[in-house]
């Protein structure tokens, strides 16, 4: 009897032990790692796909689950877009697993969670189907589970649900961005809001894919969980404490639910921490945050000037390199990889026409791609890029770019001009750049 108990104990221990940081060397030793898709893991400042270093140029495809939905989606478009991405070497998609509340035309509609704790079953099916189709193409998903911004409901919607009053929508004339930020910062100390959000984490991470039969926590198509899109310390330095407490609790819950897949914050970097690099470093000191992130928005940050496009494109490249260097230095210091998980650039004159020149965009993209080429050669900490974003075969209103319920989704969020930063299937020169870069990363 003692021998049998000992055997049972040893066998159960083998099954239960899984550590994401040594998964590369134990790929055949657990049920999770017998997946036909290689697990993405981290070792020092590098990602590994199975036992090989993994560097990538991927994209943002936040709307993927919406067009993958059986009833309200467009699966024919989804398949065409996934095939096109695969053709140009894109195998890493950053995807929204959220959208809260059914707001106006400046909000994602339909919402995954139209009411707190209630889910749109068609969109859950769409998420399952998207991951199923990505599996066929050996693609990886970075899934972010909340949003600092109103375009998908996000943190501000949780506050409204829990008695904090109407969200001061900054896209309406009566409200300012400061009012919105001051409202949203309350999320990180709102106990019922956090509880509802944690329930969302548990629901999604604990889900079983209806097409593959795989639990999300055991599906290697998922590269990582991001706690939110661009979570920020808002307005004043004294908000750091509440933000950090929320972040650490969130990371701890995700780790307890899924100790295999990677965790990241989804932050835009220094820009989200009151321009204080030390704060960025402090907030990312949690050992269970597996890699760092940063974003890059030359137009939004005032680097790019529509009246002086050629010169300001070069200024944007210079500033982008400096911004990346600051964050890469922190990644090296913390011995973690870093991904630039958003960067966008408009067409000439910020035109929404698909016929407008993308020469300046391609110049900017090429400069960013050079950085990851060099990082691969030197085994650097910059390990991935996700441009914003892939719009594929979407049809948009080129006159004013306004999005309304029922329109195609493009890469640009509903409250922004549709097509402003989107890369379409017709942008052949940009797609060729991406294809060439991904081939370099694969060959070198």
Image (cartoon, rainbow, N blue to C red):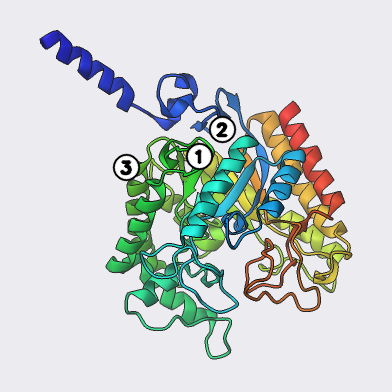
Residue 333's disc is: 1
Give the spatial CA distance, label 2 vs label 3: 24 Å
* Residue at x 28% of width, y 66% of height: 191
Which one is in front, 144 or 316? 144
Which one is in front, 354 or 326? 354
Q: Is residue 183 left or right of residue 11?
A: right
Measured from the top left, where is residue 159 in percent x and y?
A: 37, 74
Q: Is residue 97 above or below residue 102?
A: above
Neighbour class for label 3 at 10 Å: few (<14), some, many (≥20)?
few
Q: Is residue 276 visible?
A: no
Give the spatial CA distance, label 1 vs label 3: 26 Å
Of all residues, the one furthest to the left in this rendering is 1
Mark 2: which secondary structure? strand
Mark 1: which secondary structure? helix
Which one is in front, 66 or 309? 66
Q: Which residue is mark 3?
A: 256
Nearer the observer: mark 2 or 3; the answer is: 3
Measured from the top left, where is residue 400 in percent x and y?
A: 76, 78
Nearer the observer: mark 1 or 3; the answer is: 3
Of all residues, the one furthest to the bottom in this rendering is 174
Give the spatial CA distance, label 2 vs label 1: 13 Å
- First in residue order: circle 2 vs circle 3: 2
Q: Is residue 365 left or right of residue 93?
A: right
Q: Quadrant of the C terminus?
A: top right
Q: Which residue is mark 2?
A: 46
Q: Quadrant of the N terminus?
A: top left
- First in residue order: circle 2 vs circle 1: 2
Neighbour class for label 2 at 10 Å: few (<14), some, many (≥20)?
many
Which one is in front, 305 or 12? 12
Mark 3: which secondary structure? helix
Q: How many marks?
A: 3
């Amino acid at each position: 009897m003692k021998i049998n108990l000992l055997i049972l104990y040893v066998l159960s221990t083998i099954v239960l032990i899984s550590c994401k940081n040594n998964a590369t060397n134990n790929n055949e030793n657990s049920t999770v790692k017998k997946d036909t898709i290689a697990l993405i893991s981290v070792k020092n400042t590098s990602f590994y796909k199975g036992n090989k270093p993994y560097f990538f140029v991927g994209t943002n495809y936040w709307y993927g689950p919406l067009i993958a939905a059986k009833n309200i989606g467009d699966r024919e478009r989804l398949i065409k877009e996934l095939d096109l991405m695969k053709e140009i070497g894109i195998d890493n998609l950053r995807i929204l697993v959220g959208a809260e509340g059914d707001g106006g035309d400046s909000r994602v509609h339909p919402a995954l969670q139209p009411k707190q704790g209630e889910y749109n079953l068609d969109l859950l099916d769409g998420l399952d189907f998207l991951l199923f189709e990505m599996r066929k193409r050996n693609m990886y998903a970075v899934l972010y589970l909340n949003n600092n911004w109103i375009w998908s409901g996000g943190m501000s919607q949780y506050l409204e649900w829990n008695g904090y009053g109407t969200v001061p929508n900054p896209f309406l004339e009566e409200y300012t961005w400061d009012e919105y930020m001051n409202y949203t910062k309350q999320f990180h100390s709102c106990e019922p809001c956090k509880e509802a959000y944690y329930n969302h984490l548990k629901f999604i991470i604990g889900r079983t894919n209806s097409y593959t039969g795989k639990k999300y926590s055991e599906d290697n198509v998922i590269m990582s969980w991001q706690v939110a899109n661009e979570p920020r310390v808002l307005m004043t330095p004294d908000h750091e404490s509440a933000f950090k407490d929320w972040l650490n609790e969130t990371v701890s819950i995700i780790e307890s639910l899924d100790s295999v897949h990677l965790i990241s914050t989804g932050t835009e970097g220094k820009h989200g921490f009151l321009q204080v690099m030390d704060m960025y470093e402090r907030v990312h000191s949690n050992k269970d945050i597996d890699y760092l992130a940063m974003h890059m928005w030359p137009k939004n940050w005032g680097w790019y000037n529509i009246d002086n496009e050629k010169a300001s494109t070069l200024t944007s490249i210079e500033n982008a390199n400096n911004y990346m260097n600051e964050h890469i230095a922190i990644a090296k210091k913390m011995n973690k990889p870093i991904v630039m998980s958003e960067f966008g650039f408009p067409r000439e004159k910020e035109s929404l026409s698909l016929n407008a020149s993308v020469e300046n965009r391609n110049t900017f993209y090429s400069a960013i791609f050079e950085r990851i080429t060099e990082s691969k050669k030197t085994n650097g900490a910059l390990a991935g890029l996700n441009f914003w974003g892939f719009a594929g075969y979407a049809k948009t209103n080129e006159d004013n770019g306004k999005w309304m319920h029922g329109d195609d989704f493009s890469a640009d969020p509903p409250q922004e001009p549709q097509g402003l930063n989107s890369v379409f299937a017709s942008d052949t020169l940009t797609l060729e750049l991406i294809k060439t870069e991904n081939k370099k990363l694969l060959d070198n």
